[in-house]
Image: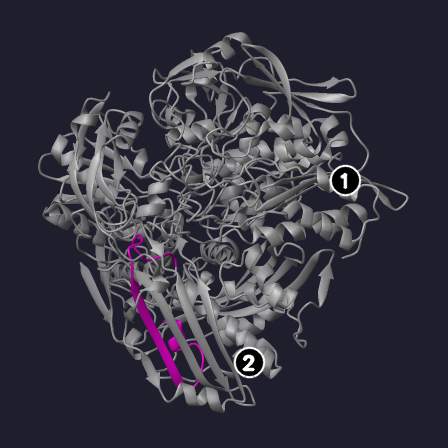
Amino acid sequence: MRPFDYQRAERLEHASQLAADSETLPLAGGTNLIDLMKLQVETPQTLVDIGRLSMGEIAEEGEGLRIGALATNTATAAHPRVRADYPVLARAILAGATQQLRNKATTGGNLCQRTRCYYFTNIDQPCNKREPGSGCGAIDGVARLHGILGTSPQCIATYPGDMAVAMAALDATVEITGESGERSVPVRDFHRLPGDTPEKDNVLEPGEIITAVTLPAPVSGKHIYRKVRERSSYAFALCSVAAIVDMAEGRITRADLAFGGLAHKPWHDPRIAELLVDSEPSLALFDKAADLLLEGAQGYGENDFKIPLTRRTLTAVLCDATGVEA
Amino acid sequence: MSVHLKQDSVDDRNVLDKTGQGVIGEPIERPEGLLKVTGTAPYAAEFKIPDCLEGVLVTAPILRGKVKSIDRDAVLSMPGVVAVLSDERMTGRAAQGMANAAPFQPAQDVEYWGQPVALVVAESFEEARDAAKHLPIEYETEEGPIDPAAVETSPAQDPTRQGDLAQAMNEAAHSVDVTITTEGHASAAMEPHAAIAQWDGSSLSVHASLQMLKFNRTELADSLGLDESKVRLLSPYVGGGFGSKLGISQEAVAASIAAMELGRPVRVVMSRQQVFQTIMRRTETQQRIRLAADADGKLTGFGHEARISNLPNEDFPEPVIQSSQFLYAGENRLLTLDMARIHRMTAGSVRAPGEAVGVQTVEQAMDMLAEKIGIDPIELRLKNLPDQHPVKGMPYSSRKLAECLQQGAEAFGWEKRPRKPRHTREGEWWIGTGVASAARIHAVVEAKARVSLQPDGTGMVESDMTDIGTGTYSILSQIAGEMLGLEPKDVLVRLGDTDFPPGSGSGGSMGASSTGSAVFLACEDLREQLARKLNVEPASMVLKDGFARWDGGQKALTELLDGDEITATGHFEPGDSTEDNLVSSFGAFFAEVAVNHWTGESRVRRMTGAFGFGRVLNRRTARSQCLGGMTWCIGNALTESLLFDPVDGHLANCDLAEYHVPVHRDVPDLQVLMLEERDGAASPIQAKGVGELGLCGGAGAIANAIYDACGARVFEYPMTPDRVLAALERV
Amino acid sequence: MAITINGQEHALPDDPRVTLLDLLRGDAGLTGTKKGCDHGQCGACTVLVNGMRINSCLALAVTHDGDEVTTIEGLGSPTEPGVMQSAFLAHDGFQCGYCTPGQICSATAMLEEIKAGWPSDATEDLEGAPEITGEEIRERMSGNLCRCGAYTNIVAAIREAAGEDA
């Protein structure tokens, strides 16, 4: 680690003031940041410890639920309301990392989790995300983990998390505070595509800090989080699907889906719900949904498999949700 | 007293069956176990040494080239930095197992990406690590081949040719010709390589994490230009080795140089990434298996041609075809091993070199052949066990392969039915079973151990032998206890110190038989010394529970010793017994696997292993060795692969998040059967190696179970979801 | 600023870069907690902080002032081993011993988590109370790698410590 100045924020405003400096980073659970600081992928001059601010509460908000930015992954997944009303979220969190990590990792930190691209985490390799202009080692390199949707010639990294994928399916909202006030951003718009500025993972501006994620009122339907991974636990997704699907009178009435492991952000394509809702479920219909999802998908050699794998995983989830027999 | 045996003949006296204590083979708890479960067993980096500096290795981010210049001043001004070393004695690679000489020097001639070239030493670890990231180094770079498939190969050993395999294939009633690939593996021992070096002005003492201290001492002394009498190594506890700590490694040499230069103790611990990138990889392999059989399923031809890789000037060839020499019949044989020279990190020993990747491919081919012939795969194997070595004609010293296949099948619940895939479906999962044979060549090496009987009647065993988790502390206390009539808890075993007599070291499953035999020989001598004191024939004396008994009397050992200590050093050397006989451990694996029909994810649901490896010295620690090997089978079959960058050859997945060793959830309850046998050619204690056998072939059982489940033959290890799906597409 | 380790108060380091793991293994002299990867990928450094298991390698020591840390040394000693430690010994739930303290700390916390009703990826009924099954143990212990391959015996040890039939 580079030497840094450690400051503990006593108030949120203080934290956001400090974090406005481009060389300052907020520290919450630290499970990703400390990891990256050891590798000198992250080299902040100042760390603002926000870990003791009172932002860990999980509370009812209207019919929905407000999950404080510092609520741990463990607390969220074990929360009775999350288990009862938002099981896709509990399942997604539990499918990620390990209990030790989830005990430390926070909601805000998890949203800001950086990619696991091998070239990003190795400072002796080119990476436009870590060092803009240095090139992308993955495009012609080891790209097994990498994206097939929304990639750019500058970056094919994926957002590695699970929690945010479920939140995208649930259409949750990220609450943000900064020097210029508070704002809300849908989780679906929180992460960015890499384009020409892959160094920016998300829409947070300097000094902005996530304060909470708000889940809308629960909706009826079957909640599924399906993660395909190489190990049976403790591995990042090759691809994952978060789904809330409801049926009435033989037709699909709701199909909120989001995908992990495929892109620089949790992938949500509104056209899929448009196609599925009001239709009778069938393998042919699911195939069309996969066509839509994977329109424009591009593999980079080693990750070509993600295209058929995603098709199959989506079909599996929709069969499970609707009872269609394969 | 020193007693020496070069074992030229079979020792079927089975002495350990005739002694009276009854502790040999017993599943005693590990004597060092309490220290391990309470966190009080000290590993290499954990010795508290005052005034100790911290060193961090600096590695080269180039494929190949030479260090031109190092800007030391750039980091010497950083807080806490004491020194930057780039000494020509530094080593860029670890020594191969039993090299007994310095590894390639100087470290500044870079042959692979990630090679250590310098050491930064500072007062604290954080200071050293930060400075190491900022050391400016200029290189003169060179190109070099990195793709093993794109270079010409040359033979790594003389081929085995007998008869005409091509003709046998042409004339065969049934045949299989298949090419299977495996990817690189890492040992990934949980304790990273670490050393603390202390120099007193004339001699060097190093706490290190090493498997074979006798060799490592010579390697370190040779690296430094020191007389080896000036070097002491200490490794009482080693946090796993699996081949990665066979030879002296870069951090131990660098720490030693730093301690000698700076006159202060220096600790160097490799980062996990450095362990992955600079220690040893198991080579990737490409293997062509050809089997020719007559209408009855008798093999008439057997071919195993393997391709491996290593750095240009590294000797070690992964002996992929080692047990193919003798596992199955077939008078027409062709076995070849060819080497590609490339600039990826050093290829070396990773648990069970050779068989760990060379048996599973043969076992897949056997499964395919059984299907073609239409017989049970166990029956095919039983039909083709040779009466003697198929080429050299020597006898098998002992071989429990048939019994392992039969008894393993029974324990597993193997259904002898026509094997047709996709017979069982549970929801989204196809369920299938598979079988494979296990084989691992047995080897012994020279070893010494000193055993004494203390005046208080307790025993003591001393050797520089290591216990890397294998159970050495346990079994040596049992061998000595059995021979001297003591409970194992009354035998103190002291290991891992080059001040003790040189044992075999841990590697190649040789430790128990080799050092165990040295202990046995020393104890035989002590028994004679006691018998002389009593004036009786040693054979007529029984030692039990601290008493010597003979016809007409008994005497407590304490009384017999009369305040004296008696000591003997056993010196074991392998001889003709392992040359005149084919000595190998054998076994069988059975696996039940579920394959997800949507995603191709494969999960092992249960697994049985049946093994015959000579005398079982401790049923608890031997079983644990088998469990460990079988766990490795799961990683080998499904998850483990080193991924190398095609541009500069660096290892991309260089950590434990992305190199997928099996986790708890990947491993179901595993069942182990141990079939006792006595192999007097293997060692005077009739024991063979077991540390690696459990890994030799089991991935093939999993592969065969994947086929039985879903109908897809996958010819690439590991069988990740994408590969299973691709194979399903071909069905 | 201070931290309590196994009931004893310790000063926090001056250098904020020092992790809880390095504090334990260094100044605190408690080398039972192991460094296997230093990046939260192996679990060898698992300790309990205020009763919760975490990877101490990913925690800066300075962030833990006022916290209560329990390490493997706090769970028992060679003369008075704890229940989980004895169970690991009895079932040979280790080989080289390097991942062992982390496994034992992790297992100790895990049984409490099951008692508290926290679900896991292996829990079928999210709203029900999880049970101590083999699959639950294996999933919940998956953050602790054992390269020797002692998993089968570790699960047996945990079952015994939990009062189940091993």
The tag on residue B380 is 2
Q: Amino acid at mark 1?
A: Glu
Task: Please tell me which residue is depicted at 13% across the width and 30% down the height of the picture.
Answer: B263
Determine whether the residue tagged by mark 2 lies in a helix, strand or loop. helix
In the displayed structure, B558 sits above or below A267; it is below
Task: Please tell me which residue is depicted at 71% across the width and 31% down the height of the picture.
Answer: A170
Tell which subunit mark 1 falls on. Answer: A
Give A114 or A139, whichever is nearer the viewer: A139
In the displayed structure, C18 sits above or below B24; it is above
Task: Please tell me which residue is depicted at 9% across the width and 35% down the height of the picture.
Answer: B201
Quarter occupied by residue B86: top left
Q: Amino acid at mark 2?
A: Leu
Image location (x, y in percent) of residue B453:
27, 51
Quarter occupied by residue A7: top left
Determine whether the residue tagged by mark 1 lies in a helix, strand or loop. helix
Q: Is residue B44 left or right of residue C165?
A: left
Q: Give the distance between the C-alpha atoms of the residues marked 1 and 2, in whole angstroms.
A: 57 Å
Tell which subunit mark 2 falls on. Answer: B
Residue B528 visible (yes or no): no
How crowded pointer 2 is (Cα within 10 Å; few <14, some 14-19, many 20+) is rated as: many
Q: Is residue B653 magenta?
A: no
The tag on residue B440 is none
Q: Is residue B327 magenta?
A: yes
Task: Please tell me which residue is depicted at 77% across the width and 30% down the height of the picture.
Answer: A85
Residue B210 visible (yes or no): yes
In the displayed structure, B350 sits above or below A75; it is below
Image location (x, y in percent) of residue B524:
28, 63
Q: Is residue B159 left or right of residue A35?
A: left
Q: Is residue B52 left or right of residue B700?
A: left
Q: Nearer the viewer, mark 1 or mark 2?
A: 1
Mark 1 sits on what residue?
A: A274
**Residues shaded magenta:** B322-351
